[in-house]
Image: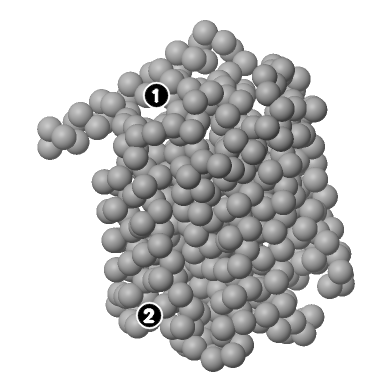
Amino acid sequence: MAECRVQASDLAVDCDSLMCDQSSSPSRFWLLTGILLIALNLRPALSSIGPLVDGIQADLGLSSTLMGTLTTLPLFAFGVMSVLTPILTRRFGSGYTLLGAMALLTAGLLLRSVPGVISLFTGTLLFGIAIAVGNVTIPVLTKDYFAESRGLVTGLYSSLMALGAAVAAGLSVPLVADLGLSWRQSLASWAALSILALVIWAPQARKISGRRPERSLIHGLRTLSRSALMWQLALFMGLQSLSFYVVLAWLPAMLSSAGYSPVFAGWMLAASQATGVIGSVIIPILAGRSQDQRGIMAALMVMELISLIGLMFMTPGWLILWVCCVGFVLGATFGLALLMIILRASDSETATLLSGLVQSIGYLVAAIGPLLIGMIYDATHRWNDAILVLIGVVIIKLILGLSAARDRVV
């Protein structure tokens, strides 16, 4: 009980510190509001499609391999654009770069709803580019403007990302089944959220001060590429994201093949994302109190391993527990990966380059996941084979994560 009181007190201190930041600089309240709204938009475009896979396949005649390709496309965009984002932030500044990303995200969401396979894939590519820019830039803004509350702010925006994923996953099917929308209209409806973020962020973009880089981009990237710690962070984030996007893309299909209804499967995906919100709030705050996160890392990996083994049996009484535990861990490890980028960077410029390079390599690794799982299922028609792959990934994540979680800086 005493331990719980200490933790609550620490959280109150973090919140008080953040509020003090707002009073000393009034624009920081709206800056944080804008960051959180942008974070809320970085997952619905992705999570809204998983529950609608069956309808999309039936309408367009796409195989599981092609649907895996559709889910993988944004991850390839993440991989390429993450390392290019520092070029944009140096040229236009972080504020205007994020503004352009929100505009591109809106365009991609709307284009994806236009009839035709080409528009579906092209729109998906566009919003994938936009999300990559947001993924890289938000941690840098956190280090620049909220360094003293880094754990709290990281927890807030990573939880908003998970919340956006959960809401979109849960509502995609009801928008079709209950409101009579087509799957295209259901996917396009999330553009309303991105337009709101665009409107709120526009006034903040010009207030964000730019910094003149002290060293060349190529030199910085070359130096980071020789760091073992950078590779550990990158591969850990990549495998974490691989697991997340496999669950996001294929969990509803796994449940449907086990005899559960599409609505139930959609809500189970939403449940996994909702518990991810809890994990992405709690874990970065706890981990931010220390420079060493190995204990938290080990506990999360063990929890994920047990949950995946349980998920192989699809037992009705236990299913929701395993789904929620997997969701919690994936949300928690995502927030932890973002926090470690901030903690392992020695300064803001390093944070920009490290965020870009780690996420670029990481998402290229993650891009293998949905496509590979789709191909495995097409070949074997057994989802347990896919879960065995994820179990192997957990073991590798544990080895990489324990090393990346040590108290060091790049």
Res. 190 visible in picture: no
Looking at the image, residue 380 lies above or below residue 392? below
Q: Residue furthest top?
A: 24
Tell me the colour scheme of the image. Answer: one colour
Q: Residue at label 2?
A: 312
- For disc 2, the neighbor class at 10 Å (few under 14, some 14 to 19, many from 20) is some
In percent of width and height, residue 288 lies at 37, 33
Identify which amino acid the numbered label 2 is placed on: Met
Q: Which residue is mark 1?
A: 15
Q: Please, which residue is most extreme toward the left here?
A: 2
What secondary structure is found at the residue carrying circle 1?
Answer: helix
Q: Name the residue rendered at 63%, 73% in the picture.
A: 371
Which of these two is toward me, 67 or 354? Answer: 354
Residue extending farthest bottom = 380
- Give the number of the mark in front: 1 or 2: 2
Q: Residue at x 57, y 10 (%)?
A: 25
Secondary structure type for disc 2: loop
